[in-house]
Image: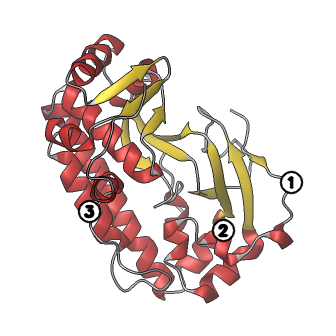
Amino acid sequence: MDSPDAFDTPRAALSTPLLQRNRLLGALSTEARLRLLPSVDLVQVRTGQSLDPARGAARRAYFPITAMASVCQVSPSGESTQVALVGPEGMVGFPLLTGSEAPWLRSTVQLPGAVLAVDGARLAQEFRRGDTTTQVLLGYMHTLMAQMAQAALCHRHHSIEQQLARWLLATADRMAVREIASTQEMVAGLLGVRREGVTEAAGRLRDAGLIACRRGHFTLLDTRGLRARACSCYAVLQSGQDSGAGAGTAGQPPRTGTSTTEQEEQSHPDHVPLAA
């Protein structure tokens, strides 16, 4: 696919507060963000758009602000399964940090929006400084690898309904939303299952009053109930994401260990289900 399109926003108009809208960049020191700023572009990405570098193109890392990406493992025969989600808490393109390649991984936009594109060579140079930037990015790489390993276990041992509940909760947490724009066919492709399986699982969750479904959209109505239906991988991955954001990082306070959906329930204990 074509490369992400730059906004009509000159680099001179970019600022370090904008970089902090991505939590991983926000965890860097102010000095590190200032060093990276000349190598950053604000770009708009579309659903289904590839974030992998085109042949001969400059390699860039992408830090989502309002978008979300899926990292999928692809077999030689073309089958694929999602192994990681990346939203405003992370980055796409971690092999750039070590100068390695990962041809078995494909990164595509799952939810459209804005991302910060950082020159890969410049980011790798910053990574090699050996200061807090190295610690923060290594911590995220560890979290991402743990997410990939947990995904393999989940696909092997848990039902489609459990996986769908986990995916909905994880997406809602990253994007701080209750409505998710995605088709059942797209979710089936990400989970590596048949669409009919997703349709049946979504129907059971809908009949239980946990979600509402309409063409191209899922709405979370009862996140507490949805967590009860999700596999244990959700809690494991949420815990890992919280610890990966970690205490003592340079640019932001520690995460609280409470998911977006849990925070919303605590703020609105008498939650009224959203309309479908």
Q: Which residue is mark 1?
A: 8
Look at label 1 and name its amino acid. Asp
Residue 128 drawn at (x, y percent)? 53, 80
Q: Around disc 2, counting alpha carbons within 10 Å, would you say few (fewer than 14), some (14 to 19), or many (20 or more)? A: some
| Left or right of residue 3, residue 187 in this image | left
Residue 99 drawn at (x, y percent)? 54, 63
Q: Which residue is mark 3?
A: 240
Dot 2: what SS? helix
**Which is nearer the N-term, disc 2 or disc 3?**
2
Look at label 3 and name its amino acid. Gly
**Which is nearer the N-term, disc 1 or disc 2?**
1
Q: Residue at x 61, y 44 (%)?
A: 51
Q: Is there any visible trace of residue 84 in the rendered image?
A: no
Residue 121, numbered label: 2
Residue 228 drawn at (x, y percent)? 14, 40
Look at label 2 and name its amino acid. Ala
Say which quadrant the N terminus sits in.
Answer: top right
Marks 3 and 1: CB-CB under 8 Å? no
Cα–Cα gap, marks 2 and 3: 28 Å
Cα–Cα gap, marks 3 and 1: 37 Å
